[in-house]
Image: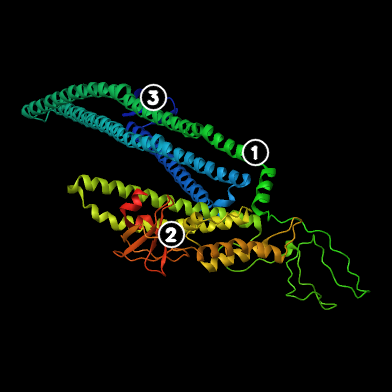
Amino acid sequence: MFGSMMVEHGSKCSGRLWILDTALDTWYVPGQFIQDQFDNLEKHTQWGIDVLEKYIKFVKERTEIEISYAKQLRNLSKKYQPKKNSKEEDEYKYTSCKAFLATLNEMNDYAGQHEVVSENMTSQITAELTRFVQELKQERKLNFHDGRKAQQNIETSWKQLEASKRRFERDCKEADRAQQYFEKMDADINVTKADVEKARQQAQIRHQMADDSKGEYSSILQKFNHEQHEHYHTHIPNIFQKIQQMEEKRIVRIGECMKTYAEVDRQVIPIIVKCLDGITKAAESIDQKNDSQLVIEAFKSGFEPPGDIDFEDFTQPMKRTVSESSLSNSRWDGKSEPKPGSKSKGKLWPFIKKNKGGGPEDFSNLPPEQRRKKLQQKVDELNKDVQKEMDQRDALTKMKDVYIKNPQMGDAASVDHKLAELGQNMEKLRLEAQKFEGWLAEVEGRLPVRTEQTRRQSGMYDTQNTSAVNNCVQDRESSPDGSYTEDQSQESEMKVPVTEFDDEFDDEEPLPTIGTCKALYTFEGQNEGTISVTEGEMLYVIEEDKGDGWTRIRRNEDEEGYVPTSYVEVYLDKNAKDS
């Protein structure tokens, strides 16, 4: 390519050397030709480097776009992820919401592939190409430095040749003038012989100087021709060849980078396809029937559909009757007949208004099925809390055993306070759980028989809560056809177990003392059937622990009740032990 700019041959014309460029088919003075081509090549190679740097900038901006896009995708996925312990988590039991969650996860992986594209383009293209550009600039600088140096050398030789030629030409002219002057003097008879001899000697000197200039010019010319040949046939072609190789290497390299650019994108396509397939699979997993069934399970009330309403004939003075099979929560408060024309207070169950606010603790404001679910959920939560407390107690107990066996590791007494605190927390949680289990049993229609042992285990709910539960059950007891009733017999039946239990407890004869006990911790007996004790207090034992975790004690004739066995240290009488 650049070798075609080579000089072919030279010829002498009017005392100047001209050079033919076969590629351009133009004649140039040597210095002018080389300078022009070096300038053009320098501009062209600099343009090539600019193209590389422009491509580097393009790839760098592409990587920034990929990183920004991946970040935005991740933020989008995170924004719509369900928040923990929130209402949104419950929504993801539906298949459509599960599919959406899977879409969010796949989009997160999809964003990761754009990050991979950015990283690979940075490492395989931007970094490599930047290093190559630096090497290319150094190589280009060296090649053009060599070219200018060769150019300066040939120009220096050209100047020496021109000076020698001018000197030879001047000496020849001086010799010609000296010869003409000698011949003129020799032909003149009036000139003395000494003047003629002097002119002859001067002519000989001039001829000698011309011969010397001729020899010097001939030598310099041969040297220049040799250097010129080397310059145009060896040095310049080599330099041009290096520049050509450098330029071709640049072109090849940018082509390779463009292939890498495409390959980096192609490598992530299979994973992106998997992400899209995952989204498609998630969409295909949506089951509308299953979601509908979940809605039914979540919102079914447990009510039976109301029966038909009887026709009321106002043309006859007759008592308005309400169908026994209708679902009505109207209360007449002892009034058997409403005023004619007045609006009925009874409402069908689908139109019962929900209580505003937090609602009662036993969820009695909810329909039966919804109430059962809420109570079951509350029981499960309390049982989990009890299990956590038990795990902590077991861990502290083991720690205490280690301290007892190895006193140097710690003081065993330092753990007692925490164990007592855990015991109190567990007791409160158990009582709370038993309270909700009682409500749950009543909702499910499996009222437990109240026995002495059951009373001790439950801690005897306080009178107010028990009354509220009984009223709640009475108000919501439904008849077989689905209607709420205010049957007085049902109310009395619900109250019978409590009344019998109270009578049994009140009429119970005082039990004999079987030993004494010392309170290890303070216990607040807030529930019916329990008794409060203070740490260090001495009391009488009247009934031993039956395996349910409670011991019955007495302070005096009027004060007795149950306390947790773990809260007291029992000293049974010898006779009681033998019996």
Nearer the viewer's eye, disc 3 or disc 2? 2
In the picture, residue 520 is in which quadrant?
bottom left
Q: Residue furthest left?
A: 194
In the picture provided, is 366 more to the left or to the right than 23?
right
In the picture, residue 560 is in which quadrant?
bottom left
* The label number, if any, that marks residue 284 in the structure image: 1
Q: Is residue 250 above or below residue 50?
A: above
| First along the sequence among labels 3 and 2 | 3
Name the residue carrying label 2: 428
Q: Residue furthest right?
A: 315
Using a 10 Å C-alpha cutoff, classify the residue at mark 1 as few (fewer than 14 neighbours), some (14 to 19) or many (20 or more). Answer: few
Q: From the top left corner, tell me how far across and down residue 245 is, in percent.
A: 37, 26
Amino acid type shown at disc 1: Glu
| First along the sequence among labels 1 and 2 | 1
* The label number, if any, that marks residue 3 in the structure image: 3
Instruction: Please name whichever residue, 224 or 484, is drawn nearer the observer in this view of the structure.
Output: 484
Q: Secondary structure at mark 1?
A: helix
Amino acid type shown at disc 2: Lys
In the picture provided, is 171 more to the left or to the right than 548?
left
The tally of labels here is: 3
Q: From the top left corner, tell me how far across and down residue 379 is, in percent.
A: 52, 54
Q: Secondary structure at mark 3?
A: helix
**Disc 1 and disc 3 in contact, CB within 8 angstroms:** no
Q: From the top left corner, tell me how far across and down residue 226 is, in percent.
A: 26, 21
Instruction: Please name whichever residue, 234 or 320, is drawn nearer the observer in this view of the structure.
Output: 320
Q: Quadrant of the N terminus?
A: top left
Q: Is residue 348 above or below residue 335?
A: above
In the picture provided, is 83 more to the left or to the right than 419?
right
| First along the sequence among labels 1 and 3 | 3
Using a 10 Å C-alpha cutoff, classify the residue at mark 2 as few (fewer than 14 neighbours), some (14 to 19) or many (20 or more). Answer: some
